[in-house]
Amino acid sequence: MPRLSLFNSPLLLGFDHFERALDRVSKAAADGYPPYNVEQTGENSLRITLAVAGFAMGDLTVQVEDNQLVVRGRQTEDKDRVYLHRGIAARQFQRSFVLADGIEVAGASLDNGLLNIDLVRRVVEQKVRTVEIRNTGKPTRPTVAQAAQKDSA
């Protein structure tokens, strides 16, 4: 069955990047593992904390791909261990977060089974710039000030 798209209309040309972002978000939301928190740590800073108990630093990767934060985890299987009961699965995961424009990853740390990823929002300074208007040498209409001088003369 073909997939119906919100952006299939010929009036919405050039919106395919929004469709791809929506696809990534819907796929990421399908699996609830690992659980995570998002907290505001300052006026322009956030922290995403993922519960990754059992994963070592070498088992985790944090990457930014096309305004998307992607966290992957893959545990290596220890072949020497013999399990009588295995209730803690060594499963791999991928968790994605779409980053808004201006959000940058400041760093990541692993502490007691929690992966903390710090994000910072760049503060963009408002700049006002005056653009010089040059005379091209072509005759122009008189300005209001010139017209007033001409009438008073």
Image (tube, grey):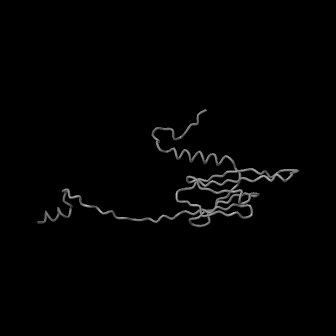
Q: Position of residue 26 (x, y in %)?
A: 62, 46
Camera-side residue of 83 and 122: 83
Image-based side of 130 in relation to 108, left or right: left
Image-based side of 46 in relation to 114, left or right: left
Which quadrant of the figure has residue 23?
top right
> Image height check: is 141 above or below 5?
below
Q: Position of residue 61 (x, y in %)?
A: 66, 56
Q: Residue at x 71, y 58 (%)?
A: 58
View extreme (top): residue: 1
Camera-side residue of 48 and 146: 48
Quarter occupied by the C terminus: bottom left
Q: Position of residue 18 (x, y in %)?
A: 53, 47
Q: Position of residue 144 (x, y in %)?
A: 21, 61
View extreme (left): residue: 153
Q: Residue at x 76, y 53 (%)?
A: 76
Which quadrant of the figure has residue 135?
bottom left
Image-based side of 18 in relation to 28, left or right: left
Q: Residue at x 77, y 51 (%)?
A: 90
